[in-house]
Image: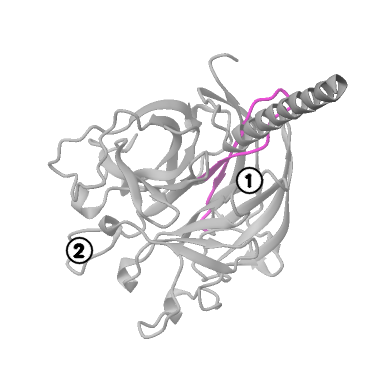
């Protein structure tokens, strides 16, 4: 009997130990998936390459790459084209990026997937648009791999001239429509042009929270009711918004966009805005600010900076209808990288940003991509960085 009691006690203790080990392993795994311990203080340039302007894949023109995301489960990359179905139907590409801590070896496009509307049709272009039809025009800008469902989230900027609001939608990895996340009412247009998004300055960035519970979006420029856009002499306040997966606004913060750098009196156009957002941990994010300045000779130059922002201690503005003349505390921001100071042949229209694979030394990698606007004078550029923190 005594031996039986000892055997039962031993079995019970062994069960407890195995359970604790399993729980710790699960918790560690969850922490890796959520990347809650990720830190970003500096970026070290590894390498860059361009996709040739005339490159095609499966009878589609590769260009307009405005978003990039990484699937760590398959080691695949997804590149979103912002083609408004003018060259080919709205789409995203699968790719392999072969790089290490020293160089970016090659970019291989492996597949292309057409984005579908809820009715199963391709998105249409502006010439095909009809108010009586249920088919809409998409202006895809940001793409994210969903760690919960292995699906894709993507955003569209909308088009005031067509009466189309921005949207956030889920698709599967083949581009088939799954669902739509309702956007905040403050972003939606009115008929008097007194509120809502500005054309081509709207829902430009998106990211999942590190635990996957929520979705964050960034507006490229201020809403109409929030004040004027940035100028050479003054910055502006845009909005970053946290939604749950059903579209309820959980929080919202004012983001201080820089004034337009190097904009002289004789320039033709000058603008600056937030082109992407990326979660670092539960309160810090990277933002990508991209300014474009057109000189009097019609040539363009881009100025691109990557900031780290912290939403802690910022005012939650989700219930503030208009920021203009409101007293709010914006998020704090710190410069992480100025691409114009890097050893790059060209700094183009950078629009996409994502964390990539771990490097051999255990550090994260960060990959950014430029949108060439299907223009011969611009490039589809992929740039890889090593992520450093102050301990490195």
In percent of width and height, residue 321 lies at: 19, 51
Q: Quadrant of residue 37?
A: top right
Q: Quadrant of residue 130?
A: bottom left
Which residues, given as a range, are shown in magenta? 352-373
Q: Residues within 10 Å of mark 2 (few under 14, many from 20)?
A: few
Q: Which mark is residue 193?
A: 2
Name the residue tied to disc 1.
Answer: 70
Magenta stretch encompasses residue 374: no
Residue 271 seen: no
Q: Nearer the viewer, mark 2 or mark 1?
A: 1
- Number of numbered discs on residues: 2
Magenta stretch encompasses residue 356: yes
Q: Residue at x 14, y 40 (%)?
A: 326
Farthest residue to the bottom: give it. 132
26 in relation to 242, above or below: above
Side (left or right) of 352 relative to 225: right
């Amino acid at each position: 009997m005594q031996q039986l009691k000892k055997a039962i006690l031993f079995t019970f203790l062994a069960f407890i130990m195995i359970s604790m080990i399993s729980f710790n392993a699960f918790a560690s795994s969850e922490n890796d998936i959520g990347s809650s311990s990720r830190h970003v203080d500096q970026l070290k340039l590894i390498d860059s390459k361009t996709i040739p302007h005339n490159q095609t894949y499966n009878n589609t023109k590769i260009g307009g790459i405005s978003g990039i995301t990484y699937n760590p489960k398959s080691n695949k990359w997804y590149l979103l084209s912002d083609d408004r179905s003018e060259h080919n139907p709205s789409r995203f590409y699968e790719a392999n990026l072969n790089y290490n801590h020293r160089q970016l070896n090659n970019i291989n496009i492996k597949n292309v997937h057409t984005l579908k509307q809820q009715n199963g049709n391709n998105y249409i272009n502006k010439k095909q648009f009809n108010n009586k039809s249920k088919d809409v025009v998409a202006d895809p800008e940001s793409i994210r791999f969903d760690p919960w469902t292995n699906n894709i989230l993507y955003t569209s900027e909308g088009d005031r001239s067509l009466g189309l609001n921005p949207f956030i939608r889920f698709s599967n990895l083949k581009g088939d429509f799954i669902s739509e996340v309702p956007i905040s009412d403050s972003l939606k247009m009115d008929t008097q042009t007194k509120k809502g998004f500005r054309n081509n300055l709207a829902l430009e960035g998106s990211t999942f929270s590190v635990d996957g519970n929520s979705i964050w979006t960034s507006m490229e420029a201020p809403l109409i009711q929030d004040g004027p856009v940035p100028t050479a002499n003054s910055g502006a306040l845009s909005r970053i918004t946290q939604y749950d997966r059903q579209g309820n606004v959980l929080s919202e913060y004012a983001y201080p966009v820089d004034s337009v750098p190097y904009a002289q009196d004789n320039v033709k156009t000058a603008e600056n805005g937030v082109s992407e957002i990326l979660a670092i941990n539960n309160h810090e994010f990277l933002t990508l600010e991209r300014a474009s300045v057109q000189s009097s000779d019609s040539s363009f130059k881009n100025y691109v900076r990557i900031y780290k922002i912290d939403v802690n201690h910022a005012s939650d503005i989700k219930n503030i209808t208009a920021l203009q003349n409101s007293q709010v505390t914006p998020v704090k921001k710190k410069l992480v990288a100025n691409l114009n100071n890097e050893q790059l042949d060209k700094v183009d229209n950078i629009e996409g940003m994502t964390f990539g694979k771990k490097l051999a030394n255990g550090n994260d990698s960060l990959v950014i991509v430029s949108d060439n606007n299907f223009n011969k004078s611009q490039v589809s550029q992929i740039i890889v960085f090593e992520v450093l923190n102050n301990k490195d």
